[in-house]
Amino acid sequence: MQVGFLCYNGKFYSSGDPIFTADNRSFRYGDGCFETMRVHQGEVVLSDLHFERLLASLHLLHFDIPSHFTKAFFLRQITDLCHKNNLTHMARVRFSVFRADGGLYEPINNLPCYLIQAWELSSTVLELNENGLVLDIFPDARKTSDKFSSIKSNNCLPYVMGAMYGKQHGFNEVLLLNQYGRVADSTIANVFMVHHKTIYTPPLSEGCVCGVMRKHLLNSELPFKIEEKPLTIEDLENADEIFLTNAIQGVRWVGLFRDSSYGNATAAILHEVLFDGKV
């Protein structure tokens, strides 16, 4: 069975090969960020938004970005890896960036290293979930609302623990709250709710990740009114619908949050609009 390949700083390695040392700054400190993308028939879906977010994150983290690190370079590295792994239909790709080895908390330099991984992705991700997700709150951590909270950071501990909590308690997903006790995001998605025919999602100032699908929806012409506003637990409990978004699965609707149940009329229309290529 073929092991497959990954790309590390522009070179291909067998995915089972050791490539990091104990001085790797992502391992030591979570010093870096990443993008998770869906590649469909050789094209990175929403590539402009992914590259825009990656560059914004690298600037926020004070990386020295090489002149060759362009969108064309970014996309070529991804598509070359997918081709090498014979992922011609659909793939999930993770593009991780971390600071070069050396130093303690203070780095020796700010040069970026990168790692790209690709896996086959089932076409079922293009289908709206048949059963509504069971959702609850992760009680053991809070997300801060600061200039770094919108980054997809390599330091993912609250999300890891949240995902473990969800599995232990039989939830499909859990929400993380910010320091004010309001909704930030879920372990792998942004949160939206529908109330009186208007869609609401927390602004970035509430501590949520700047999701690519979230931004895509906010910037698109949709058959719904959509607004950013802080969301409380009570808001969600009184919502008409709740749905989650990310770049891999698009839209997933929530059927149960605590003692409240929901339909999926708005999510179903959004899903059809997104995957029919109309948005």
Image (tube, helix red, strand yellow):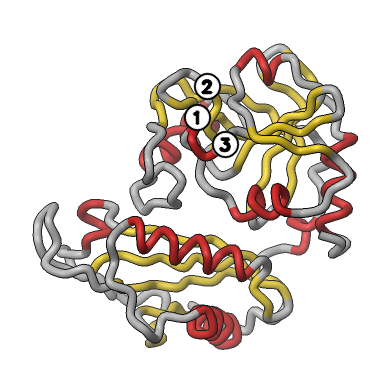
Q: In this view, does 91 lie above or below 41?
A: above
Alpha carbon separation for disc pair 2 and 3: 11 Å
Which quarter of the figure is the C terminus placed in? bottom right
Q: Please identify, in this view, whether the residue under mark 2 or under mark 3 is nearer the observer.
A: 3
Query: What's the residue type where badge 3 is placed?
Result: Pro
Q: Mark 1 points at which residue?
A: 176
Secondary-structure class at tag 1: strand
Q: Which residue occupies 13% across, 52% down? A: 105
Name the side, left or right, on which 214 lies relative to 154.
right
**Secondary structure found at label 3:** loop
Density class for disc 1 (Cα within 10 Å; few <14, some 14-19, many ≥20) is many
The image quarter containing residue 7 is bottom left
Residue on which the image places disc 2: 182
Q: Earlier in the sequence, mark 2 or mark 3?
A: 2
- Mark 1 or 2, closer to the camera: 2
Q: Residue 258: where, in percent of width, then height?
A: 66, 16
Is disc 2 placed on a helix, strand or loop? loop
User: What's under tag 2, amino acid-wise?
Assistant: Arg
Mark 2 Cα within 10 Å, few/some/many (few <14, many 20+)?
many
- Are the residues tagged 2 and 3 within 8 Å (C-beta)? no
| Position of residue 264 measured from the top left corner of the image (x, y, whole percent) | 85, 34
Name the residue carrying label 3.
203
Depth order, front residue of 250/144: 144
Which residue is painted at 64% across and 65% down in the image? 38
Mark in the foreground, 3 or 1 = 3
Earlier along the polypeptide chain: callout 1 or callout 2? Answer: 1
Residue 93 on image: x %, y %: 55, 68
Q: Residues within 10 Å of mark 3 (few under 14, many from 20)?
A: some
Q: How far apart are labels 3 and 1 at the CA level?
A: 14 Å
Which residue is depicted at the point 52% across and 40% down? 204
Image coordinates for residue 175, horizontal then vertical, percent = 55, 29
